[in-house]
Image (cartoon, rainbow, N blue to C red):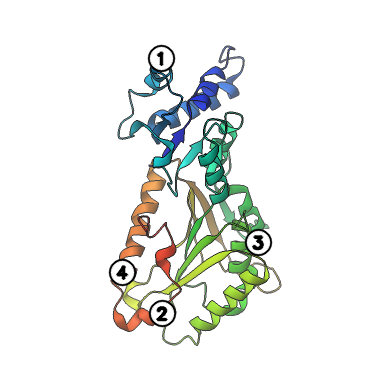
Amino acid sequence: MIDTIIDIEVLKSFYNSKPSTDPSEDSKAWEEWLAFKKFLKEKTNLYLLANCLKEDAKQNYLGDLTTGRGNAKQGIEEASNYNGYQSIYFINKINHSKISKKIKISSLAHASSKDFLELWKNLSFYNKTTSYIVNPKNNKLFPWKRIKEYVTAITDLVIVDPYIFKSPHLLDNNLFTLIEHLIINKKQSTHITIISYVDKDNSFDIEDAYSKMKNYFNNNNLNITLSIVLTPPHKQLHDRYIYSNYFFVYSGNSFNYYKEDNTLKIKESRIEFNSYCNIDYHKQSLEQLNIIKNMIEYMPIVYKKNILGNPKNNRLIYPNN
């Protein structure tokens, strides 16, 4: 499960925001408050920042979240101990100005005592539709610009699609457009690794695609560190995913949804958005990313030429680098 690093002031704000009305009178407010408390209590490793922390505050605010945690960890730590690429930071800027500034620059998910609940709702996709059927016959479309609705913070991306390079002429309206809408901070460096596959009958030139993508990113002022990995035939990954710091996307078809004229290429697909605030989804992503890491690490020498760039820069695949 993901880590949540929280300031005592934010925790105070949360408990002080407990609805004073009867649940029957304001069910929405109660549902949101209890859902966030359940997240802190059961669905995240919770760490309370140590400075400005008094014993009574520890008992009053942390004590209520101690029991019933299952496998969720809990602790009190110094702010300097944390630089997690998948951590959520609820931080009082006055008490922690240095770490707050550092987190903001790095594009990690962060909020203060004023907007912590809103951040959590965005990260957890609270009350959002998370599954869509894409079908041109029923006029059910999913324009790539809509993916912005699910992005809160991103520093690294892993795109898995064995067919994304099968039709190079479709890259502009699909892969390039998709990446551009996923990046919310153009100035911040984002590490992107694309895992794909090209069979021996395909005339695809990996170096040409790599160069074209880098030129596209430069021309659009996107600060992206790119790597491409083409898997050996016996290691081909069938499913299509996009992994980020806080969620992953599943697609029933290749992400080459659209033709050059922007009409749908696919007959039907399903696209799903899965938040890591759900323990099972986070565990699933870690398992799949570990498979990708092992595939890269033990790539036969003859296929090493199919790796361009350095995937070890990507913290989703190499979290300890």
Precedes in sequence: disc 4 or disc 1: 1
Q: Position of residue 280 (x, y in %)?
A: 38, 44
Work out which quarter of the rendered image holds the N terminus and state it.
Answer: top left
Residues at marks 1 and 2, CA–CA distance in whole angstroms: 58 Å
Precedes in sequence: disc 3 or disc 2: 3
Label 3 secondary element: helix
Most extreme residue toward the right, as rendered? 261
Q: Amino acid at mark 2?
A: Asn
Residues at marks 3 and 2, CA–CA distance in whole angstroms: 38 Å
Label 4 secondary element: helix
Residues at marks 4 and 1, CA–CA distance in whole angstroms: 50 Å
* Crowding near the residue tagged with mark 4, few <14, some 14–19, many ≥20 C-alpha atoms within 10 Å: few
Please tell me whether mark 4 or mark 3 is closer to you in this view. 4
Precedes in sequence: disc 4 or disc 3: 3
Q: Amino acid at mark 1?
A: Asp
| Picture quadrant where residue 231 is located | bottom left
Query: What residue is shown with label 3?
Result: 137
The answer to whether the residues at label 3 and label 2 have Cβ atoms under 8 Å apart is: no
Query: What residue is shown with label 1?
Result: 56
Query: What residue is shown with label 2?
Result: 306
